[in-house]
Image: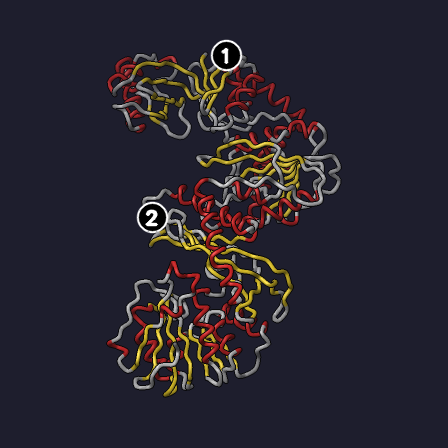
Amino acid sequence: MTLFATCPKGLEYLLRDELRALGADDAREALAGVHFSGTLELAYRACLWSRLASRVLLRLAEFDAADADALYAGVQAIDWSQHLAPDGTFAVDAVGGASALKHTQYIALRTKDAIVDQFRERTGERPNVEVDQPSIRLNVRLHRERATVSLDLSGTPLHRRGWRQGQGDAPLKENLACAMLLRAGWPAIHAAGGALVDPMCGAGTLLIEGALIAADVAPGLRRAYFGFLGWRGHDDGVWQAVIAEARARAEQGLCALGSVFYGYDHDPNVLNEAKRNAQAAGVAGFVQLARQSAEHLHRPVGCDVPGLVICNPPYGERLGERERLAGLYRAFGDRLRADFTGWHAAVIVSDDELGHALGLRADKRYVLYNGALECRLLTFDLVAESAPRERTARPLSEGAQAVANRIGKSHKHLRKRLVRKGISCYRIYDADIPEYAAAIDVYTAIGRDVSTAQVEPFPQTWLHVQEYAPPADIPEQVARDRLRDLVHAAGVALEVPRERIAVKTRYKAKGGSKYGRFDQRNEFLVVEEGGLKLRVNLFDYLDTGLFLDHRPARARIRESARDKRFLNLFCYTATASVHAAAGGARTTTSVDLSATYLEWATRNFALNGIAGARHQLVQADVLEWLRHDRGEYDLVFVDPPTFSNSKRADDFDVQRDHAELLALCGERLAPEGLIVFSNNSRRFALDATSLQTFDVRDITPSTIPFDFARNARIHRCYELRHRGHGSAFS
């Protein structure tokens, strides 16, 4: 019998060794599978005992099939009465193609027609097609105009063991889980008395497969269906002998198995699924499950012999998630170093940067595929060490080196001017090299905000990277690789470690390119601007709390605010109000709809010792508030969003609504007062016709910071006064 066992890419050599251990002495690896030959008993053993194979195929025929007629004739040349009863059922899976046969559905259809027609001609009856559990399942593979027709002895994928009752958000296939366990050396670790710990166990796949390996339980023992059970060539006596042996081995192995399997997860619903799965697999009594996050992982009590910590953590394949997950990986790596000295560990990752975030040096790296996703299995020997091992810096690619050179040149060019002006937060790169399209801002923190008015000092440089939407013709993977190179280059050029670089990435969604989800680190830094302390958060929000392009505008507001009644609309975190108060404003009134930003504004005031009834923070829809307010103001700063669709207020569009907004501001403006109106809409056009009661002056050039010179369209800025009252803000 000529056989072929399929498997996910990356498992070929493991599967070859497994089949040789089962008796397939001539097993030889191929792409995504292993060729071997042997008896029917060996084929049964492969179906029952392979922990790695996806399917076991028995070759029936191989022939030329340049077109549909040749395929039909080749299939009809097989005597199907040897394989299928006239009243039986069958299904056809087709893979590959030829020049004249490009569609797998059509290949399967022509194969089906050939089989049915043969039965009709010989018996007057025809078998029926059954998709789920047919009497036999056939596999037709076309490659270079040659067809191979095989009987799928497995019937359904072998990773379906028959125990899975539920699964988490990112289920791990059972054969991939076994590959991880085997690569990590689990059989030898268990034989030496070690335990198995999965700190992110999800539905329990790794724990259950680890227990089945340790107990010598055949992975297919709980399957009720195999593809050979309805096959006319099936020998039930041989099969029952194979099954009986497996049952005896399982009974003996489970009797000797210890309760050395520990699974943790933060999600109680997923833990319930793991419990049900372990019960269905017959290993619930050996698996201990508890709710716990990976950041608080501890060695299980009583586990004195070094064991194995293994897990399938979140991959962060959605753009924007990698930066959020880096903290989880770092914390997990810290726990491994702190409490698992002498143990072994194995982690599967899809992103090298996340792997590096563990802070551990991998002893071995294996390429595995989780579906179509290429991953790396990293294995570690956790030796005693007081700090993370220092790893060799990854060399810069050619493109990344060009970016690093550019950033270094810009930094050298700006440095003297930044020092002279006392600027510690600035833009260093703005798509200077078009292929590497992102903006990079430097934030020099003087400390961390730990309470309303207290700062924990630690001067550090941080980077904030915002990706621009790549052109539609750039593949997503190319854009992702370029961004990764850009981040690496920036860290190298400015000597900033990866954990202090916040990255905001875009993803494609309905309505255009959008930014991905953000972290929930709740880590607030304190920076200085003009001697004032301001609170920023680089990771949790799209914007950081401080618009760097408004630095000159804030400075001018401060210079102009003495004895003025200052109004800040769409105030965000009220940084302009802090500047106005520092400049001697008589009063400040800051209006925004967001309670989060107003709380942030409160902390900005407190950090600078600004308090009292003279400084008001108002939570309200700006337009609605202006319609009802009766105050009078000497200096008004208006910096609205381009668009807002808050559930608590009417939609706002700066192009559509700016004339009404400024007219309402004019009603609240003192006779000699000044409105400073700014917005970031690149297509904005001021409606001069509707604003004829104002003297309007475009002051944009004087409000663009020198470090934003490459992107002078970052905002538009105007000053407006009641007609006939001149201009002072310039």
Which residue carries the number 1 mark?
38
Indicate whether 250 appears above or below 121: below
Question: Residue placed at 57% from the left, 59% from the top?
Answer: 523
Q: Quadrant of residue 725?
A: bottom left
Answer left or right for 289 relative to 576.
Answer: right
**Of helix, strand and loop, which one carries label 2?**
loop
Q: Nearer the viewer, residue 712 or 463?
A: 712
Which residue carries the number 2 mark?
471
Q: Amino acid at mark 1?
A: Gly
Q: Residues within 10 Å of mark 1 (few under 14, many from 20)?
A: some
Q: Quadrant of residue 302?
A: top right
Question: Residue placed at 60% from the left, 47% from the top?
Answer: 330
Q: Quadrant of residue 568?
A: bottom left
Q: Where does residue 106 sit, x and y in percent of width and height?
A: 28, 27
**Of helix, strand and loop, which one carries label 1?**
loop
Q: Residues within 10 Å of mark 2 (few under 14, many from 20)?
A: few
Q: Nearer the viewer, residue 48 or 181?
A: 181
